[in-house]
Image (tube, grey):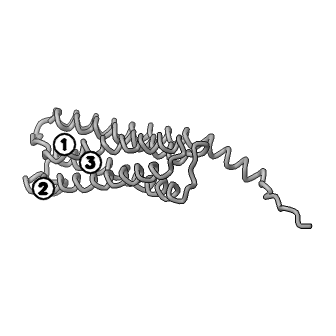
Amino acid sequence: METKKTKKVNPHRAEIKVARRKTAKPLLYIGIVSIIMLFAGLISAYVVRADNGNWKVFSLPSITIMSTAIIITSSITMFLAQNAVKKDNLKLTAWALFLTLALGIAFFITQIEAWKQLTAEGIYFIGKFSNASGSFLYLIALLHLAHMAGGLLALMVSLTKALLKKYSSADYLGIELTAVYWHFLDLLWVFLFLFLYFYR
């Protein structure tokens, strides 16, 4: 008579998994704090340099308002994904993650379009025709997009796992970490946009 084989769980591997879960969020928060410090330093340098004269004043392209609306909407779809996975609705989770990813890419596109408009207006990042005001704007926007790239990668991983049904209401740490980082990037951009829009 054949007996049903039971799958043995490697206790060492289980311990590693638990340890990763305990350290994942603290490490993410440490990373977020370091990003905040980076941008705080840039904003401080921006303010100091703006007060030293030879500062070209210009308006942000109107498309940056669209960028801001897009990234705020992406946070809403991210919240939707979080709520869906808690209810084991993996189909809705995947759709919400896909929409968040699409909106993130749209944000990238609108940002690049904004840079094209600025260049057409004679606002350059570097070169003999550049000014510190434009250089700071490009640098801040580029650094934010660099961190957004990491967020898009995390979204791709989370979306793939959701499609493979690797998440459940009992295990959705990957989506939770992605959501925390994505919402942070959203808030960071809103702050940067308001600062750059009003402090010219």
Marks 3 and 1, how far apart at CA: 14 Å
Q: Is residue 79 left or right of residue 68?
A: right
Which of pointers 3 and 1 lies earlier in the amino acid sequence? 1
- Type of amino acid at the residue the image marks with label 3: Ala
Of the residues under marks 2 and 1, which one precedes in the sequence?
1
Residue where numbered disc 1 is placed: 65
Image location of residue 35, percent across then percent down: 40, 41
Q: Secondary structure at mark 3?
A: helix
> In which quadrant of the rendered image does the C terminus lie?
top left
Q: Quadrant of the N terminus?
A: bottom right
Element on which disc 1 rests:
helix
Which residue is at the far left? 121
Above or below — where is 164 with respect to 46? below
Q: Amino acid at mark 2?
A: Thr
Is 134 on the left or on the right of 176, as rendered? left
Q: Residue at x 19, y 42 (%)?
A: 65
Q: Which amino acid type corresponds to the residue marked 1 in the rendered image? A: Ile
Number of numbered discs present? 3
Q: Which mark is residue 16?
A: none
Residue placed at 34% from the left, 37% from the top? Answer: 187
Q: List the residue tagged with mark 2.
A: 119
Frontmost of labels 3 and 1 is 1
